[in-house]
Image (cartoon, helix red, strand yellow):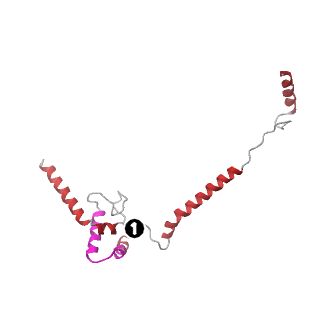
Amino acid sequence: MRFSLIILMSLLAASQLRAQIVTPEVKKVAQAFMCQCGDCNYQLSQCSMLNCPSATPLRAEISDHMKNGLNELQIREAFMAKYGKVILSAPTAQGFDRAAWALPFVMLLVGLAFVYLVIRSWLRRKPALSPTTGNSGLIPEDFQKKLEQELKDFE
C-alpha cells in the first residue's frame, strides 16, 4: 500500500513538472521539432511519453532559451546548429530540401498523366472482328467442306 502511494505521488509530481515546462509558448515553438527518442516519431509538442528521454530535456531547453529572451527563429537556428536538420519536423525551403516539398506534387501529376494515358489507350483499342462468312484460314479446307456437309445433313 505504501509503495503504491509513493509511486502515485511521484507520477503526480512528474506530471506537474511537465505541466510547468510545457507552456503554450513552449508548445508553439516545439511544433517545429521532432522528438528524438526513436520510439514515438511525433512532433516535440505532441510527444506524450512520460519522462521521455528526448522530449523532456528538449522542452526544458526551449523553455530556458525563451527565458533568456530568444525568439522562435533564434531557437530554431540554435537547435539546427546543435542537432542538425534531423531535429526539424518539416524540411526547409532552401536548397535540395525544396525537392522534398515539390516531389509529392510532381509524382501526383505523373501518376495522373499515366492513368489518363492508360485509359485513353483502352478506349481507343478496337475489338478484333471475328470472320462471319467463308473460310477464315484457321480451318483447313477439307475440314471446312466436311463441316458444311454435316450441317446440310443435319437440316
- Which quadrant is the C terminus positioned in? top right
Q: Is residue 121 left or right of residue 42?
A: right
Across and down, in percent, residue 61 comes to 28, 70
Viewer-proximal residue among 28 and 75: 28
Decide: is 119 above or below 20: above
Q: For the stretch drawn in magenta, what is the main secondary structure? A: helix
* Residue 72 figure quarter: bottom left
User: In this orientation, which residue lies closer to the viewer: 68 or 126?
Assistant: 126
The answer to if 62 sits in the magenta stretch is yes
Left or right of residue 136: residue 81: left
Q: In this figure, which residue is indicated by the disc labeled 1?
A: 88
Using a 10 Å C-alpha cutoff, classify the residue at mark 1 as few (fewer than 14 neighbours), some (14 to 19) or many (20 or more). Answer: many
Where is residue 14? Give x, y as percent: 21, 59
Front in this rendered view, residue 144 or 28: 28
Outermost residue, bottom direction? 69
Q: Quadrant of residue 37?
A: bottom left
What kind of element bears circle 1? Answer: loop
Residue 82 among those drawn in magenta? no
Q: Please report the residue visible at 86 percent of the width from the left and 24 percent of the height from the top.
A: 152
- Badge 1 amino acid: Leu
Taking the spot 87% from the left edge, 33% from the top edge, the residue there is 141
Viewer-nearest residue: 73 or 3: 73
In the picture, measured across the screen, residue 144 lies left or right of residue 111, that is: right
Above or below — where is 146 with respect to 44? above
- Percent coordinates x, y for residue 55 in the rendering: 30, 63
The residue range painted magenta reads: 54-78
Above or below 150: residue 67? below
- The reply, left or right, for residue 153 in relation to residue 70 is right
Image coordinates of residue 90 in percent, x first then y, are 42, 66
